[in-house]
Every structure is written in C-alpha cells, then in structure tokens.
Amino acid sequence: MRRGVRFPAWYLLLVAVFGILSGCQSLRDLQRFAIHHHAVLTEAPGVELRLPPSDSSFRYFFH
C-alpha cells in the first residue's frame, strides 16, 4: 500500500542543492529550508505540491 506523498527525484535534488548552498548541514535543516521556501520552490519550476518534503523524504532519497 502506498503511503504519503511521492516527490520527484529532481525536485528533492534541487531543494537539497539550494539548501546546502544556503548552509544546511543536516536533514532537519533541509526540511526547515524546504518549509520556509516552499512557495518559491514549487512556483518557479511549476510543480504542484501541497506539502514540502520532510527530513525522512531526504533520508530515503539519499539512501
């Protein structure tokens, strides 16, 4: 059974790169960055995502 939201890999990579360039050093920092900049990060590439990715989304992506 599928649970949760599925994020495109390119979107997670985009958020991670921008977050790391902004000084994020942990998965929680990336989550905070994604929450804080959610409107801009979804508007610019035209992605329709209701929720920003969580730290566990980044953890699964990097695993």
Image (spheres, grey):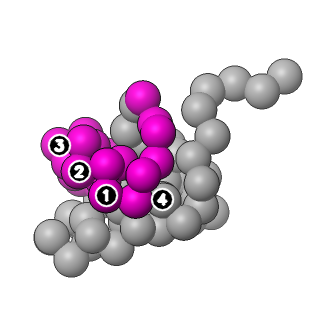
Left or right? Give the position of 4 relative to 58: right
In depth, the one of 10 and 42 nearer the eye is 42
For marks 1 and 3, give the CA distance: 15 Å
Question: Which residue range is magenta in the image?
Answer: 28-50
- The image's mark for residue 62 is none
Q: Label 1: which residue?
A: 44
Q: Is residue 51 above or below residue 41?
A: above
Residue 46 located within the stretch drawn in magenta: yes
Q: Is residue 61 above or below residue 49?
A: below
Label 4 vs 2, first from the N-terminus = 4
Q: Label 2: which residue?
A: 40
- The image's mark for residue 36 is 3
For marks 4 and 2, give the CA distance: 14 Å
Could you tell me if the residues under marks 1 and 2 are in contact, i.e. CB atoms within 8 Å? Answer: yes
The quarter in which the N terminus is drawn is top right
Q: Is residue 22 above or below residue 42?
A: below
Left or right? Give the position of 57 relative to 27: right
The number of callouts visible is 4
Foreground disc of the pair 1, 4: 1
Amino acid beneath label 3: His
- State the SS at label 3: helix
Amino acid beneath label 2: Val
Amino acid beneath label 4: Leu
